[in-house]
Amino acid sequence: MAITTPNSVLSLSSSHHDNQPRIPLILSPRSHPVSLIRNKRPSSLAIRCFNKDDNVSSEKDTPIELKFSAFPTVMDINKIKEILPHRFPLLLVDRVIEYTPGVSAVAIKNVTINDNFFPGHFPDRPILPGGLMIEAMAQVGGIVMLPEVGGSQDNFFVGGIDKVKFHKPVVAGDTLVMRMTILSFQKRFGLAKMEGKAYVGASLVCEGEFTIVSSAGTSS
C-alpha cells in the first residue's frame, strides 16, 4: 500500500485504546512516495517518507576520489611483455582490461607528460601523435593475435591501415582505452584484419581498420 505526503516525514500510529478525535490527513499534489510499515507493536503503524533527493545528496557527499573505480587488470605489464616484443620507449600498452585470445582485447595507455615525445609534440600543447596512437592500437592487435599463431615476442608488422579517422586530440593526463577486434584471421599465414577503436572516457578519439602480419606466420 502506498500513500503520498508532502516533503516532511510523517508517522501515523493507531491503537485500540486511542480515544482522541481523528484528524484528517491532507495530501498535497506535490508529494513524495511513502511506504507503510508495521511498528514493533502489533497495534501500531508507521509511515516512512522516501525523499527522491536522498540519493543525490549522498552522491554529493562522496569525495571525488572515491567516485570512480579503477580499471580491472586482466593482464599486467609483465604479462604484456611476455607477448609483445616492444620495449622502452615504444611499448605503448600499460594494461589489458579485457581479453579473448584470437577474438578481441581492450587495453589502456596512460598518457603522461613524462612520455618522451611530448617535449617536441608540442612544447606548448602536449598532444599524443596520431602515428603513435595507431602504433599503440596495433600493439593491442598483436596481443590478440600473437599467442594464436604461436609467436609470442616475435616481431609483427602493420601491413595496412584503412578508414582511419581522428576525432579528438589526446593530451597529457588522458587514459587512452583501445579495443581491437579481429574481423578475419588466417592463422596459417599469421595474417589478421582487425577493427580498432580508441576512446578517452566515452568519446571516440580514433578508429580504423588494420591489417597485421606476424613474422611467425610469414616464416612458415
Image (cartoon, helix red, strand yellow):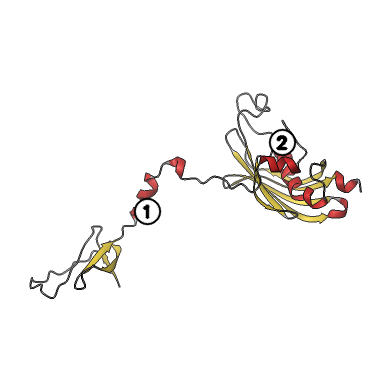
Residue of label 2: 91
| Residue 134 seen by the camera | no
The image quarter containing residue 44 is: bottom left
Q: Residue at x 39, y 48 (%)?
A: 59
Crowding around mark 1 (Cα neighbors within 10 Å: few <14, some 14 to 19, many 20+) is few
Q: Residue at x 7, y 73 (%)?
A: 19
Residue 18 percent coordinates (x, y)? 10, 72
- Residue 55, label in figure: 1
- Between tags 1 and 2, which lies in front? 2
| Residue 103 seen by the camera | yes
Residue 78 percent coordinates (x, y)? 69, 40
In the rendered structure, the answer to whether residue 190 lies left or right of residue 19 reads right
Q: CA distance from mark 1 to mark 2?
A: 43 Å
Q: Nearer the viewer, residue 97 or 109?
A: 97
Q: Nearer the viewer, residue 182 or 72?
A: 72
Q: Amino acid under label 1?
A: Asn
Residue 168 percent coordinates (x, y)? 62, 40
Q: Please, what secondary structure does the residue beneath circle 2 have?
A: loop
